[in-house]
Image (tube, rainbow, N blue to C red):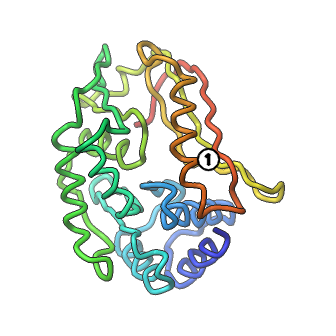
C-alpha cells in the first residue's frame, strides 16, 4: 500500500496540476487513488480540489506509465457537472456482472416527498455502466471516457452506484434537496483503521438514507464491514480493519 501511494505521488509530481494543493489534501488524494488501484474501492469522486479534464487525462496517462498496478484505473468525466471519477474498471466489471445475476449491492430510492424504492436497477444505470465498460476496450490504451450525455439526476444515481453506496438516490424533478428537508436520516461513515498508531484513520465512503423504513442500521453496518474487509489483503500491513459508524441526523439540506 505504501509503495503504491508513493507511485501515485510520483505521477502527481510529473503532472502540471493547476491549483495549489495542501499537503493534507495531497496525502488523502494519493491514498484514495491507491485504494482504487488495489481494488479496495470501485470509484472515487475527486472533491478535494479541481483540475481540468486535460490535466486529469495527463495524470491518468502518467499513472499508466509509472507502474502496471494502475492498468485497471479508468478516468470518467462529466464535463457539464465538472466531475472527475477514478474507477477500478475490473472491479466495476465484476460488480456489473454480479448485478445481472444476483441481488445487486446498490438499491435505488426515488427522491420524492415520500421516498420509494426503485424495483431492480434503473435501465439508465445499466446502460451507463455498459457504456463505460464498452469504452474500456483494452487495458493498454483506454484510460478515460466521458458520460456528459447523462442528465444531473441520472448522474446522481450513477454516482451512488459507482461509489458503491448500498442506497443511491434517484432525484425526480429539479428540487430534490427539499424532499430531504427535516427528514431523519441514517448517516453512515466508513473508515479504514490502520494497523499502527502513526497513520491516521481514513474515511473512504460516507452516505445517507432515510431512517424510516430502512430496517436495522446495525445489519447494514455489519454488511458493509464484511464486504470491504474481504478486500483488505492488498492493503496490509498498513490497514487492518474496516469500521462503519452510523448516526441519525435531521438536516436542513443534503448534498447529493
Q: Position of residue 215 (x, y in %)?
A: 46, 16
Image quarter where the C terminus lies is: top left
Identify the residue shown where x is 68% and y is 56%.
239
Q: Position of residue 17 (x, y in %)?
A: 50, 75
Pick the residue in front: 30 or 113: 30
Please tell me whether residue 97 is drawn above or below residue 6 in the rendered image. Answer: above
Q: Position of residue 154 (x, y in %)?
A: 24, 42
**Left or right: 195 in relation to 208:** right
Label 1, residues with CA under 10 Å away: few <14, some 14-19, many ≥20: some
Please tell me whether residue 151 is drawn above or below residue 180 in the rendered image. Answer: below
**Left or right: 66 in relation to 144:** right
Q: Position of residue 201 (x, y in %)?
A: 71, 50
Pick the residue in front: 123 or 47: 123
**Left or right: 4 in relation to 152:** right
Please tell me whether residue 128 is drawn above or below residue 121 in the rendered image. Answer: below
Q: Please give the count of numbered marks on the rendered protein.
A: 1
Determine which quarter of the picture holds residue 84: bottom left
Please tell me whether residue 180 is drawn above or below residue 14 in the rendered image. Answer: above
Q: SS of the residue at dot 1?
A: strand
Identify the residue shown where x is 48% and y is 30%.
208
**Left or right: 210 in relation to 241:** left
Identify the residue shown where x is 50% and y is 83%.
67
Image quarter where the N terminus lies is: bottom right
Q: Residue furthest front?
A: 101
Identify the residue shown where x is 42% and y is 55%.
42
> Disc 1 designates what residue?
203
Q: Residue furthest right?
A: 197
Amino acid at each position: 500500500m505504501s509503495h503504491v501511494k508513493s507511485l501515485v505521488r510520483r505521477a502527481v509530481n510529473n503532472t502540471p496540476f493547476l491549483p495549489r494543493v495542501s499537503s493534507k489534501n495531497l496525502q488523502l488524494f494519493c491514498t484514495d487513488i491507491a485504494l482504487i488501484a488495489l481494488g479496495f474501492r470501485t470509484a472515487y469522486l475527486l472533491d478535494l480540489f479541481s483540475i481540468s479534464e486535460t490535466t486529469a487525462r495527463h495524470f491518468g496517462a502518467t499513472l499508466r506509465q509509472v507502474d502496471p498496478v494502475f492498468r485497471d484505473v479508468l478516468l470518467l468525466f462529466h464535463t457539464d457537472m465538472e466531475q472527475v471519477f477514478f474507477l477500478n474498471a475490473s472491479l466495476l466489471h465484476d460488480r456489473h456482472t454480479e448485478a445481472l445475476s444476483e441481488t445487486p449491492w446498490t438499491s435505488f430510492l426515488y427522491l420524492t416527498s415520500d421516498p420509494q424504492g426503485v424495483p431492480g436497477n434503473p435501465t439508465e444505470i445499466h446502460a451507463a455502466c455498459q457504456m463505460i465498460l464498452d469504452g474500456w476496450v483494452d487495458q493498454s490504451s483506454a484510460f478515460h471516457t466521458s458520460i456528459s450525455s447523462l442528465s444531473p439526476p441520472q448522474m446522481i444515481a450513477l454516482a451512488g452506484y459507482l461509489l458503491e453506496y448500498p442506497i443511491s438516490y434517484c432525484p425526480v424533478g429539479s428540487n430534490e434537496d427539499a424532499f430531504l428537508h427535516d427528514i431523519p436520516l441514517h448517516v453512515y461513515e466508513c473508515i479504514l483503521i490502520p494497523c499502527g498508531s502513526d497513520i491516521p484513520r481514513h474515511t473512504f465512503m460516507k452516505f445517507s438514507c432515510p431512517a424510516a423504513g430502512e430496517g436495522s442500521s446495525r445489519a447494514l453496518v455489519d454488511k458493509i464491514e464484511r464486504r470491504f474487509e474481504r478486500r483488505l489483503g492488498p492493503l496490509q500491513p498498513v490497514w487492518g480493519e474496516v469500521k462503519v459508524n452510523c448516526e441519525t441526523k435531521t438536516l436542513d439540506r443534503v448534498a447529493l
